[in-house]
Structures are given as C-alpha cells and as structure tokens.
Image: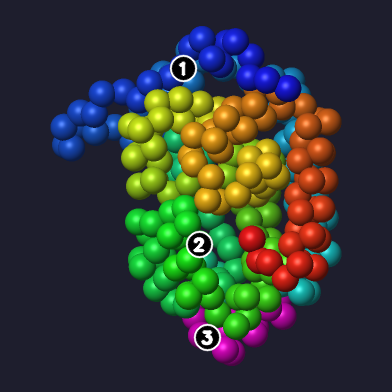
Amino acid sequence: MSVPARAEARPLAAPAAPRPDQRPSLAEQYAELASQTYAPRRVDVVLRALDLVIAGTALAVLSPLLGLLALATLVTSGRPVLYRGQRVGRAGRVFTMYKLRTLQPGAEARLGNVYGEELSRRTEQEVTLVGRAARLTHIDEVPQLFNVLRGDMSMVGPRPVRPAFFSRLVEEVPQYWQRLVVRPGVTGFAQTRITREDSWEDKLIHDLEYIADRSIRLYLRVLGATMLRIIRLTFSGRNR
C-alpha cells in the first residue's frame, strides 16, 4: 500500500501564525484546509458502525476487570482513578481523553514537555504498582472506549496528541494537518509497525497511509495486529 498521489501532491501547510489576540482555534485553522483536501467516504459510515459494536462489546466484557483495577488504584495511590488529558481530534477539535491512571499523581505536568526516548525513560520512573500491571496488559487504555462511543475517537486511526505538541508539530512537519481528516484511534497503523521512539515523521507516513487506504479490511487488520502485539508484549513482560 502507498499514499495516493493526491496526498503527496497537495501537502497541507500550517497557516501563518497570527498575533496571540487574533489566534483562531485549531478547528478554525483546519476547517478551510479540510474542505479543500478530503471528502467523506462511504466506508467511514461502516467503520463508525464497527466502532460502536466493538467498543460497546469490549466495554461490557472488560468493565468488571476495569472496576477492580480502578478500586486497587484508589486504595494504593489515591485519587484520581482516571487520567484525563486534552487531545486534538478530528478537524482540530480538542477533547478529553480517558485512561486508567497508571502514573503517580501530577505526572502529566512533569512529563508534559518530553517525548521519544526521554518520555519512555521518565515514564518508567512514574509508574505505580497497579499501573505497571495495567500497562502490561494495556487494560489502562480501556476507558478510551468511552471516547469511541462518544464519537471523539475511533478504534483505529492516528493516535491523538496533546494540543501543545500538535501546535509544535504542524510548524515542524506541515503535512501533520492531514492526520485530522479522521478520528484519532485507540490504536493505529503506526503503532503496529514502529515504536514510541521513532520520529514523528516516520509515524506520520504510516498514519497517512492508513488515512489514504482506509477500508474495512485494513481496519480489521490493524485491530488484529494490535491484539497480537499486546499478547506478545504481555508474555514477554514488556508494557509498551
């Protein structure tokens, strides 16, 4: 699979930065660019239906285990039980993403400006006892299924990033805007192929490949690859 020529021939550039008092929201900046580039596809309706069925079923099955881990988190490291973080979604809309908290309270502020290898190293120092077990099996990601049901996310798509990172990335990588034509995903094509330490440019290549070639078959392929990856990491004792 390859990114169609349309995506390569028409790279999107971030708009010129206005004065702070005139700065539009991310959604406003992206609205015009989105209308010029991609149109909705019929397959998106089917993929949304799959999102609802899969997310709803998974929540029903995993809720008891998630409840036990939430109680263990509350007892061992206190509140909050859920991590709530701002992320950039489709068309630049900022939403609140949910996860089971696996790091020490306040870790978001301490890790907010780092990524790549440094983020991986420092994250390990912040993981709680319950969080380590939750991260090993990826059960900490289950609350994102609520985001899927609400329409903030899809089961498969580019992983969402923090608004501060996004603002930086669209300046460094102009094509980064193109990730916003679909909902961000609980898992993504890039996550099945590369690691957190790979560059944003490398991840973007795989994200754009999924966006350009998205189909029911590719959607299910990514979900299957994600499940195999989780099983492999769990049995190898690695949490990410």
In which image quadrant can residue 4 be found?
top right
Q: Residue furthest bottom?
A: 75
Image position of 88 with respect to 28: above or below: below
Q: What range is drawn magenta here? A: 67-80
Q: Position of residue 64 (x, y in %)?
A: 78, 74
Q: Amino acid at mark 3?
A: Ser
Magenta stretch: includes residue 24: no
Where residue 154 sits: x, y (%)?
Answer: 66, 42
Mark identifier at residue 86: none
Front residue of 220/194: it is 194
* Residue 116 falls left or right of residue 238: left
Query: Nearer the viewer's eye, disc 3 or disc 2?
Result: 2
Label number found at residue 77: 3
Residue 177 in the image, given as x and y percentages of width and height: 45, 28
Q: Residue 175's quadrant in the figure?
A: top left
> Which residue is tagged 1?
11
